[in-house]
Image: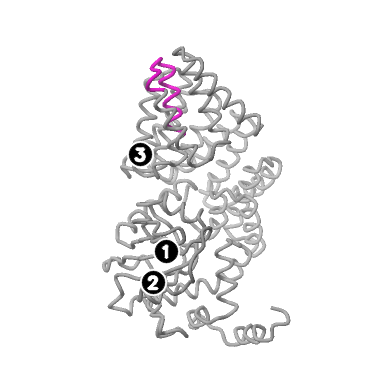
Amino acid sequence: YKGNSCRTEQIEKFSSEYNPNKAIEWYCKDSFVYRLLNRALRTENIDVIYKFRFFITDLHFQLRPLDRQCSNQPTKVYRSQKMSINEIKILEENQNGLISINNFFSTSKNYVTAEGFVDSGTYDYPKVVFTINIDSSIGNDQVFATIEDVSDFSQEEEILFTIGTVFRVDSVEQVTDTYWSVELSLDKKINVELKHLIDNFEEMIGEKLTVAHLGNALFFMGDYNRAEKYNRVLLGQLPPKHDYILLVNINIGDAYLNRGDYPMASEFYDKALSIATDLQPNPHIYLALTYSSIGLLNDKLSKYDEGIECLTKARDIKLKYISSDNRDMICIYNNLAMIYRHKADYRNSLEYYKKIIHIKSSFYDLDPTLASMYNNIALVYTELNDNDEALSNYMKALEIELKLLPSNHDKIGTTYNNIGLLYRNKLHYNEALSNYEKAREIFLNNLGKDHLNIASVDHNIGDIYYKIGQFDKAFDYFKEAIDIQSKLL
């Protein structure tokens, strides 16, 4: 804003007058705060978001008491905005699923007001009008409030939802080429499902969530560069002997591990190990986390025996604190199952996968990671040439995936393809072809025609036609597979 006297005066005023009780007031102004924060949230600019962390916190906690003060919250609110076709497609594919909003979500109790927030849409960026149905018995887990009394625009009858609010997508309807209607809902059932998702994330990282795991969230999103960057920022701000320094070193090591920079991963794991071995009580639970990461590094380096030794140490330390069937053991069991599978020690791999199934089944009937475990078990049985057991586990995985995931999700396509391979091994060619074709349809819809997954399934379909003597069709599919591979490889 250099040279913009109006904005610079605003910045000076913010610097001298802002306090946590004025967060809503500043957010609702036509100010640099609103513009910069929303742009950062929309583009996921972690650097700017981190700088605004105090304001995000203040705004969230100022909304919470307002939420409680209002006894007659609306049951229906509205919002309009322009969205890209790709963004709308994501909503379409996630009907009956949950979405999390990555910014503060402004709505109005008045449909006409909300509908007028934006002008007409275009073919590439249609206008989308949201109708949000709110269960009046939602409870305290979702934060939103009427802010017309503290807003500069009271006539808009504004309801503001906090960042990260989770809605269910009830319907997505195209009204015209440039106008869409979307219905969302906020209900008590979402809170139960959110608790389930948080439990799953804690299982994946092997312990309760802490501030150090914000960087780890970027890691699970596959954004390893920003995961490293955020954790390095955190590392520079922590006091010298803070407990989180160990966790941050592990996070940075994990980022390097997944980028394939094993020497740098080892360097940060060694730093974590030197801290963990001095912690009290000894052995400290953080020592288990460190050994687990070092075990995964050895797995990547094909040093399976060394990896198993580290992961076994991690397992034994955790068992000093919790029981063998505690869900916090799942992360260690999964790592052991994986490294044994890579070592071709399939019996031990199965043992640990079955431990995970036992624990998860006692907590949840349906769980996306439970489907992954069944898929992994099926892979092991495939290596053991036990097609019947492999098929049985793929079917269990598919049953869960069909209930929890969008019907055209890539994972479902992969499972159909794997089921087709097993039917092919059992010489059940019609069943194999049927599953391959389902996989192909999903991959085409999601990935387009020029993708290696399409090439793989085309080759599999060609193989079936070759085996049943339909050589012309076999040739066509083999040629399609080769053409795709020649473009991409």
Taking the spot 67% from the left edge, 42% from the top edge, the residue there is: 266
Q: Secondary structure at mark 3?
A: helix
Q: CA gap, disc 3 to disc 2?
A: 33 Å
Per the rendering, the mark at residue 400 is 3
Residue that numbered label 2 is attached to? 144
Q: Position of residue 405 (x, y in %)?
A: 39, 44
Number of the label disc, if any, that sits on residue 47: none
How many numbered discs, if any? Answer: 3
Q: How is the image coloured?
A: one colour
Is mark 2 in CB contact (under 8 Å) with mark 1? yes
- Sequence-first disc among 3 and 1: 1
Q: Which residues are magenta?
A: 414-432
Q: Which residue is mark 1?
A: 165
Q: Residues within 10 Å of mark 1 (few under 14, many from 20)?
A: some
User: Residue at 60% of width from left, 78% of height from top?
Assistant: 32
* Label whose residue precedes the other's in the sequence (2 or 1): 2
Q: Position of residue 377 (x, y in %)?
A: 43, 29
Residue furthest to the left in view is 137
The residue closer to the viewer here, 459 or 311, is 459
Q: CA distance from mark 2 to mark 1?
A: 9 Å
Question: Which image quarter is the N terminus in?
Answer: bottom right
> Is residue 355 rendered to the left or right of residue 455?
left
Q: Which amino acid, by three-letter code, is at mark 3?
A: Ile
